[in-house]
Amino acid sequence: MKNQTIRKIVWEDIRDTIYKVQPMMGELIDELSPNHELPLYLAHYPFGAYIKDRNQFYYPFNGEGEKVIMGGNKKTFVDDFSYANKNIPLSIILDNSAELFI
């Protein structure tokens, strides 16, 4: 995907980065000992992109926020985040910051 701004990873891929940003969170995740069956997603939202609006979370596909509905070509992704429904999934901001007006 040319402008892919979200990709599926596993804990080992991001462990060192999490420890640099939030060591306590890294320790807690290490205690859970997640395996490859518990995927993580590394996402990037460009400045000004929608993250959440009117009770709908936007996933960052193709450089812009996109509503994701069940099914379609993003089924695995939607399945992995089904616990969040339309809310913001459990997240850690690794770089810069985010402002949400709820």
Image (cartoon, rainbow, N blue to C red):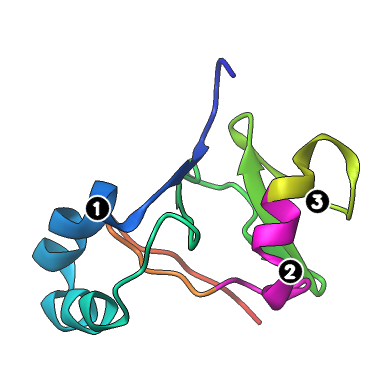
* Viewport quadrant of the N terminus: top right
Left or right, 18 with respect to 70, comes to: left
Instruction: Let me know if residue 34 is in the magenta part.
Output: no
> Which quadrant holds residue 32?
bottom left
| Amino acid, disc 3 | Val
Marks 3 and 1, how far apart at CA: 27 Å
Which residue range is magenta in the image? 77-89
Between discs 1 and 2, the one toward the N terminus: 1
Residue 88, horizontal then vertical, whole percent: 62, 72
User: Which label number is shown at residue 12?
Assistant: 1
Q: Disc 3 designates what residue? A: 68
Q: Is mark 3 on a helix, strand or loop?
A: loop
Q: Position of residue 21 (x, y in %)?
A: 16, 66
The one nearer the camera, 73 or 86, is: 73
Residue holding disc 2: 82
The reply, left or right, for residue 80 in relation to residue 53 is left
66 in relation to 83, above or below: above
Mark 3 vs mark 1: give the one in front.
Answer: 1
Mark 2 residue crowding within 10 angstroms, few (<14) / some (14–19) / many (20+):
few
Q: Residue at x 31, y 58 (%)?
A: 11
Q: Do the residues labelled 3 and 1 touch (CB within 8 Å)?
A: no
Q: Nearer the viewer, residue 32 or 3?
A: 32
Q: Distance between the residues labelled 2 and 3?
A: 11 Å
Q: Position of residue 26 (x, y in %)?
A: 20, 74
Number of labels in the image equals: 3
Mark closer to the chain start, 3 or 1: 1
